[in-house]
Image (cartoon, rainbow, N blue to C red):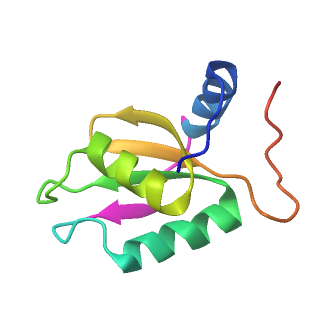
Amino acid sequence: MTLEITSKQRAYLRSMCNTMQPILYIGKEGITDGTVKEAWDALEARELIKCSVQREAPLSAREACQELCERVHAAPVQCIGSKFSIYRPRRKDPTIVLPK
């Protein structure tokens, strides 16, 4: 189950991603339980994160984005090259206010 956002909301989040650096890296092990926990914690802290898929990873960035979104109940925002961004509002006091 992934979070659904509109194209207008996705565009707003994409503009926020432009200046972000990746904080989560997917390596040769692929997406492990540790990676999922790290992504969950990062989303609770930041709501919007950028991830990078390393060369030796068994997944493409698009595949990794889709799998990670399903496992942490997030919405895919952008996928370019080996980097992708995902969004999920905090359970308490979300800070990013999406346009309607």
Furthest residue in direction right, as rendered:
93
What percent of the width, then of the height, locates residue 22? 44, 54
Instruction: Give whichever of 55, 29 is nearer the camera.
Output: 29
Instruction: Give whichever of 76, 50 is nearer the camera.
Output: 76
Give residue 83's quadrant in the image. top left
Furthest residue in direction top, as rendered:
8
Q: Main secondary structure of the magenta part?
A: loop
Instruction: Please report the bounds of the magenta region as a residue range.
Output: 18-26
Q: Is residue 18 above or below residue 66?
A: above
Position of residue 97 in the picture relative to residue 13 (left or right)? right
Q: Is residue 43 visible?
A: yes
Position of residue 53 in the picture relative to residue 79 (left or right)? left
What percent of the width, then of the height, locates residue 37? 49, 76
What is the count of numbered marks? 0
Position of residue 67 in the picture relative to residue 58 (left or right)? right
Position of residue 86 in the picture relative to residue 100 (left or right)? left
Q: Quadrant of the C terminus?
A: top right
What percent of the width, then of the height, locates residue 79? 39, 35
| Residue depicted at 30% across the width and 40% down the height | 62
| Residue depicted at 83% across the width and 40% down the height | 97
Q: Is residue 25 magenta?
A: yes
What percent of the width, then of the height, locates residue 59? 19, 52
Q: Is residue 22 visible?
A: no
Q: Is residue 88 magenta?
A: no
| Residue depicted at 81% across the width and 27% down the height | 99
| Residue depicted at 62% across the width and 20% down the height | 7
